[in-house]
Image (cartoon, grey):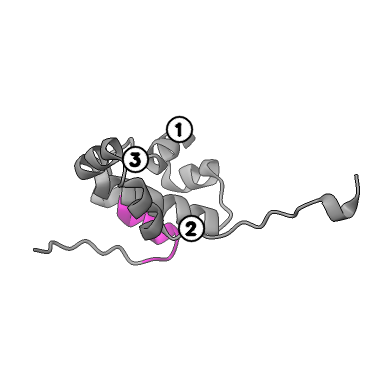
Amino acid sequence: MNKKNIIKKEKKAIDFQKYLARQLKDESVKKYYDEYGKQLEIAYQILQLRQQQKMSQTELARRLKTKQSNVARMETGQQNFTTDTLQKVAGIFKCQLKVEFVK
């Protein structure tokens, strides 16, 4: 294969807000998002933090003292989060946890 024909793919960071805006044009996605949106946003943030640190789900699970399957569910929005768990995640990634109620 000719080297000129090989296309090198670069990984680009996805702007979540732009991605979300595109996805919400689909009514079935919008309905689901309205019900579970905040949980999905948190899940996406955890996934992004883990990937930025080049950490495996298994390693994050070990640090959280849980199973890899629980981390997988967290990252897909299929697991509810306690504030304790979110605080542990924030600590692992050296972040502050901020929760606020707004009108």
- What are the residue bounds of the magenta stretch? 86-95
Q: CA distance from mark 2 to mark 1?
A: 25 Å
Provide the major secondary structure of the magenta segment: helix
Residue 53 appears at what percent x and percent y?
A: 55, 58
Q: Please tell me which of labels 3 and 2 falls first in the chain.
A: 2
- Dot 2 amino acid type: Ile
Q: Please tell me which of labels 2 and 1 falls first in the chain.
A: 2
Q: Residues within 10 Å of mark 2 (few under 14, many from 20)?
A: few
> Which residue is pictured at 90% across the width and 44% down the height?
1
Which quadrant holds residue 28?
top left
- Dot 3 amino acid type: Gly
Taking the view exactly as shown, the residue that stands out farthest to the left is 103
Q: CA distance from mark 3 to mark 2?
A: 18 Å
One can see residue 66 in this view: no
> Which residue is pictured at 39% across the width and 50% down the height?
44
Q: Nearer the viewer, mark 3 or mark 1?
A: 3
One can see residue 88 in this view: yes
Q: Nearer the viewer, residue 26 or 46?
A: 26
The residue indicated by pointer 2 is 14
* Mark seen at residue 77: 3
- Dot 1 amino acid type: Ser
> Circle 2 sits in a helix, a strand or a loop, which is it?
loop
Q: Residues within 10 Å of mark 3 (few under 14, many from 20)?
A: some
Q: Does the magenta segment cover residue 45? A: no
